[in-house]
Amino acid sequence: MITQANGLMLLLVLLCLGCNSQFGDVTGKVTLDGAPLVGATVEFSPEGGSPAYGLTDEAGKYKLQWTAEQSGAQLGKHRVRITSFNEAKPRIKERVPLKYNRKSELTAEVSRGRQNFDFELVSK
């Protein structure tokens, strides 16, 4: 028998399960000329939505965050931009060619669940 309290708890659980339904968990690895691209910003920008960002670690791996509280990226097609520029160190030259950042040709389709997008960039 479902009591009113149990029914309310069930409703809350179902609502929470639907909270992430418009996001997909996105991870991956970025390399430049075969070597991990360390400290790069990876941006997934959807058509008509807010972008998600990730920062590559020492192995070139990243995980996207939409907000501080929400991991992943919105569902749908994204323009992907990758940059090694760091505002804290503006004198360091951008190592990533324009075709991967400001004039990016990279795209990705984010779906529900977990997915991995690796990017093997070349400097020439």
Image (tube, rainbow, N blue to C red):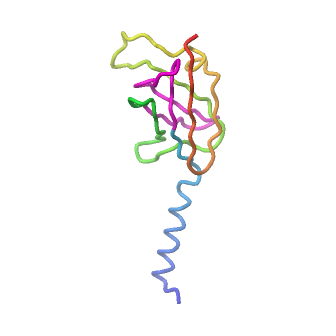
Q: In this view, does 57 lie above or below 22?
A: above
x, y percent for residue 109:
65, 39
Question: Is residue 34 shown in magenta?
Answer: yes
Q: Which residue is drawn at 65% across and 22% down?
A: 105
Q: Which residue is drawn at 40% across and 31% down?
A: 57
x, y percent for residue 76:
65, 41
Q: Is 63 on the left or on the right of 79, as rendered?
A: left
Q: In which quarter of the image is residue 21?
A: bottom right
Q: Main secondary structure of the magenta part?
A: strand
x, y percent for residue 115:
57, 44
Q: Residue at x 50, y 29 (%)?
A: 42
Q: Residue at x 62, y 29 (%)?
A: 79
Q: In this view, does 30 lie above or below 73?
A: above
Check the picture and name the quadrant holding the C terminus: top right
Q: Is 12 on the left or on the right of 92, as rendered?
A: right
Please count the marks in the image: 0
Farthest residue in the left direction?
A: 88
x, y percent for residue 25:
53, 46
Residues 75 and 31: in front is 31
Farthest residue in the bottom direction?
A: 1
- Magenta highlight range: 28-55
Q: In which quarter of the image is residue 92?
A: top left
Q: Is 37 on the left or on the right of 89, as rendered?
A: right
Question: Is residue 105 shown in magenta?
Answer: no
Q: In which quarter of the image is residue 18?
A: bottom right
